[in-house]
Image: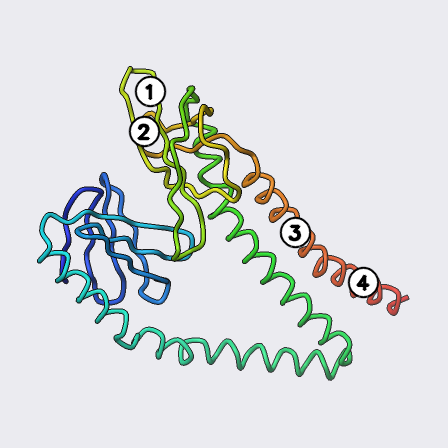
Amino acid sequence: MGVVLRGSGGTFVVGTAELVFVRRGRTRRVPYAAITGCERDGRRVSVVAGLERFEVVGRTGDAVDAFVTALDAARRRPSLAGRRLPVVRRPAVLIGAAFLLLVWILLGPLVVLGLLISALASWCARQVWRGTWKHFLADWWHLRRRGVTVDGEITGYRDSRADHTKYPKLLFTTETGRRVAVESPHFVVLRIPEGPAAITYDPENPHNARAGGILPVVIGALGAALSVALLVVPAGFLWIVVSAWFSAGR
C-alpha cells in the first residue's frame, strides 16, 4: 500500500498504477493518466479526473504534503501497463488487417471503406453514449429513482478552474428535520439564480444533492440521440451490403 491520506470527506490511497478514493464504504479507482489536476487549499486536497472531483480535508499539513508529493511522483512515473498494451493488441490488429485485405480482394475497395466508416461510427456512438451517461444522465437517473425533492436554497457557487464548471452550494432540510448545507457534487452547465430552489437529495446520503434544472438532462438526451444516430451508419451499410448480395445472387 502506498501513501494514505485520511480525513474529512474520505480517504486517498496512492497505489502502484491508480489513485484509490474511498468514501462511505464506496471505492473509486482512478488511473493516473485520467487525472487532469490536483488542487490544494490548506489541508483540503481536490483531485480532478475529467468532470469528476474528489476531495479530502487532511488531518495535518504534513500528511497532506506527503500525499501531494507521492501523487505527483506517481503521475510522473511511466505506466508499464501502457507499454504492454500494443503487444497485447497486435494479434487483433493483424487479424483485422487480414480480414480487410480479404474483403478488398473479394468485394472491392468500396466495401472496405464502408466497413472502416461503420467501425468508426460505432466507436464514436459508444464513446458519446458513455460520456453522456456518465456526466449527464447517471446521477440524474439515480436521484430520480431514489431521491427526495424538498424546498431549499442555492446560497452560492464554486467555480472550478480545473474543469471550468460550477458547483452549487445548497441549503435544505431533509424529511427527518436535519439541516444540511452542502456543496453539490453535480456540476451545472448554466448558473441558476441564487435563492429558493427545489433540491433533490439521496436519503441515504444527503450530501448527494442537486438543484433543479433540466438543461443537463436535455444535453444528455441530445447526446443519447446522437449516439443512436451514429449507429444508423453501420446499420444502413449492412443493409446495403446484404441487399446487393441477394441482388447479385439472383
For the residues bearing labels 4 and 3, Cβ distance under 8 angstroms? no
From the viewer's perspective, is residue 72 above or below residue 21? below
Mark whose residue sits in front, 4 or 2 = 2
At label 3, which amino acid type do we have?
Leu
Q: Secondary structure at mark 3?
A: helix
User: Residue at label 1?
Assistant: 173
Kindly report the distance in space between the C-alpha atoms of the residues bearing marks 3 and 1. 39 Å
Quarter assignment of residue 62: bottom left
Q: Position of residue 66 (x, y in %)?
A: 12, 62
Residue 240 - label: 4
At label 1, which amino acid type do we have?
Thr
Q: Nearer the viewer, residue 98 or 191?
A: 191
Q: Residue at x 78, y 59 (%)?
A: 239
Mark whose residue sits in front, 4 or 1 = 1
Kindly report the distance in space between the C-alpha atoms of the residues bearing marks 4 and 3. 22 Å
Kindly report the distance in space between the C-alpha atoms of the residues bearing marks 4 and 1. 59 Å
From the viewer's perspective, is residue 152 above or below residue 76? above
| N-terminal-most mark, 4 or 1 | 1
Q: Secondary structure at mark 1?
A: strand
| Neighbour tally class for label 3: few under 14, some 14-19, many 20 plus, Cα within 10 Å | some
User: Residue at label 3?
Assistant: 226
Q: Secondary structure at mark 4?
A: helix
Q: Nearer the viewer, residue 207 or 77?
A: 207
From the viewer's perspective, is residue 215 above or below residue 116? above
| N-terminal-most mark, 1 or 2 | 1
